[in-house]
Image (cartoon, rainbow, N blue to C red):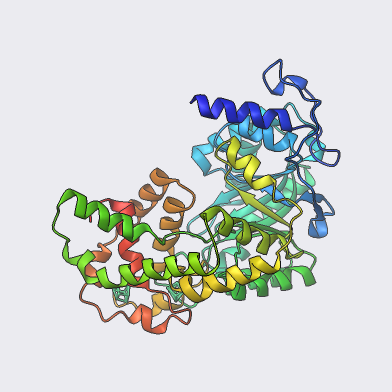
């Protein structure tokens, strides 16, 4: 607790109002007595044209901040895009934002929120009602963009209730632009769609001004096609999940823990034991070969990869604390270095098999049990990279699946046979179950 206070003080001392960022109205946003005159070292360095909206957007945006103080710090540092959704924290994310933006110049902020539906919106009236509720929670007269949240297939992009609702809300000045977010195909039974097909259909549709997608150095071959298409149609882009670096070391710690506790290694763990060791050896070789001493170096290189693509207009993060604010925003304006490029190529070579590509659903078609593989591994990403353990476990439980441990243990591993990236899917599913169910 004391450490977080110190970090907050340290950060506040460095922050000041960015000339191009969000103008602060009330000087009381931070606790009284903190100097706001010292030259900042952690602020946004780059703004980019945000597609056809014409807005000048900060290269980092706010995803789901943990509290109001963190969001205030971001806005004071020049972050001017806030991403949220009605479903985030049961509406409390929008409420948190609504409280904070009262102290800032609303006209200098771009607020992106979302409405979720599993299949279709029931009516235009429902869409309008839910949008008005978003506005109430956000304590604002308008949102800059309203998106369809996590489009699961291309059919939802044509939802007439959504579009007719948006038409009316635009006329009333309550919504300025319309967009869509996507993680790929959410349903294992609909295996002919993925991130690329869904978002290419959104680009073609012509009604979406802002697209939010998963993009990082390991799924670049999928996401960069979409970014190219967006650029041609002058569509604004928001990037999520820019850091795919995780997982190595997980198995080592797991095996160490088992050894310490003197437990028998269960059948599921035993089935992949040798590969766990190989993965750990590969990770160690990789760190030694490239002189990497911390995961932070890898994460920063991953961030610079995305920042270097001018078609990726802003990258959102779920900033959890002041350390996140400081560590991530100091990357603003940076570009990929030669060393970064070498390191990321090395990551592909040594650890590419540990990263399921977000938005790819190729292997789900061959799984005899129709496991939503990409989705399970995305939830594990929430758990292990975003540190959103409770959210990840809840989402996994809601899938109401038979356990991968029961299904994969005797399977030939068809998913691995078809994965063109060589991902060790079964091992990753084992790790995911270990994290998300805590039973292995
Ligand atoms: S394991 Fe491979 S084929 Fe399956 S979803 Fe991930 S990247 Fe695609
Ligand atoms: S190993 Fe598991 S996920 Fe892969 S095809 Fe077999 S049952 Fe499906």
Rendered residue at 34%/72% (across/down): 278
Image x and y of residue 226, in percent: 67, 71
Rendered residue at 52%/61% (across/down): 244
Q: Is residue 130 left or right of residue 352?
A: right
Image x and y of residue 405, in percent: 24, 65
Residue nearer the viewer, 438 or 403: 438
Position above or below: 256 against 309: above
Position above or below: 113 against 49: above
Quarter of the figure that contains the C terminus:
bottom left
Image x and y of residue 432, in percent: 35, 59
One can see residue 187 in this view = no
Q: Can you tell me which quadrant of the image ligand 1 is in?
A: bottom left
Residue 111, quarter of picture: top right
Total labels: the figure holds 0
Residue nearer the viewer, 69 or 289: 289
Q: Is residue 104 left or right of residue 319?
A: right
Residue nearer the viewer, 121 or 279: 279
Q: Is residue 45 left or right of residue 357?
A: right
Rendered residue at 37%/66% (across/down): 280
One can see residue 396 in this view = yes
Image x and y of residue 231, in percent: 77, 69
Rendered residue at 40%/46% (across/down): 389
């Amino acid at each position: 607790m004391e450490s977080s206070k110190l970090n907050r003080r340290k950060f506040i001392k460095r922050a000041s109002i960015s000339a191009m960022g969000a103008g602060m109205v009330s000087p009381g946003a931070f606790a009284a007595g903190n100097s706001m005159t010292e030259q900042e070292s952690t602020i946004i360095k780059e703004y980019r044209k945000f597609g056809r909206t014409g807005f000048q957007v900060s290269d980092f945006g706010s995803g789901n901040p943990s509290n109001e103080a963190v969001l205030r710090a971001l806005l004071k540092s020049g972050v001017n895009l806030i991403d949220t959704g009605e479903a985030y924290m049961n509406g409390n994310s929008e409420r948190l934002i609504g409280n904070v933006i009262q102290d800032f110049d609303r006209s200098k902020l771009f607020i992106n929120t979302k409405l979720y539906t599993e299949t279709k919106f029931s009516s235009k009236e429902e869409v309008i009602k839910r949008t008005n509720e978003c506005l109430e929670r956000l304590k604002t007269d308008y949102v800059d963009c309203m998106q369809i949240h996590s489009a699961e297939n291309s059919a939802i992009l044509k939802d007439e209730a959504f579009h007719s609702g948006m038409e009316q809300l635009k006329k009333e000045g309550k919504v300025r632009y319309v967009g869509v977010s996507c993680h790929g195909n959410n349903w294992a039974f609909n295996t002919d769609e993925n991130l690329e097909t869904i978002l290419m259909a959104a680009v073609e549709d012509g009604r979406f001004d802002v697209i939010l997608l998963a993009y990082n150095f390991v799924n670049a071959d999928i996401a960069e096609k979409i970014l190219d298409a967006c650029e041609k149609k002058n569509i604004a882009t928001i990037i999520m999940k820019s850091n795919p670096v995780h997982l190595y070391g997980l198995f080592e710690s797991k095996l160490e823990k088992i050894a310490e506790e003197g437990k028998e290694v269960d059948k599921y763990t035993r089935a992949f034991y040798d590969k766990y060791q190989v993965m750990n050896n590969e990770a160690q070789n990789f760190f030694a070969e490239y002189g990497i001493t911390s995961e932070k170096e890898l994460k920063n290189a991953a961030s610079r990869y995305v920042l270097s693509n001018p078609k990726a207009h802003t990258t959102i993060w779920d900033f959890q604390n002041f350390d996140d604010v400081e560590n991530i925003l100091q990357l603003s304006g940076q570009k990929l270095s030669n060393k970064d490029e070498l390191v990321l190529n090395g990551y592909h070579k040594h650890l590419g098999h540990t990263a399921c590509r977000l938005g790819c659903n190729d292997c789900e078609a061959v799984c005899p049990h129709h496991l939503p593989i990409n989705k399970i591994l995305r939830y594990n990403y929430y758990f292990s990279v975003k540190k959103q353990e409770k959210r990840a476990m809840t989402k996994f439980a809601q899938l109401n699946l038979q356990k991968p441990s029961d299904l994969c243990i005797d399977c030939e591993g068809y998913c691995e046979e078809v994965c063109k990236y060589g991902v060790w899917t079964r091992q990753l599913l084992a790790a995911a179950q270990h994290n998300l169910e805590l039973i292995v």
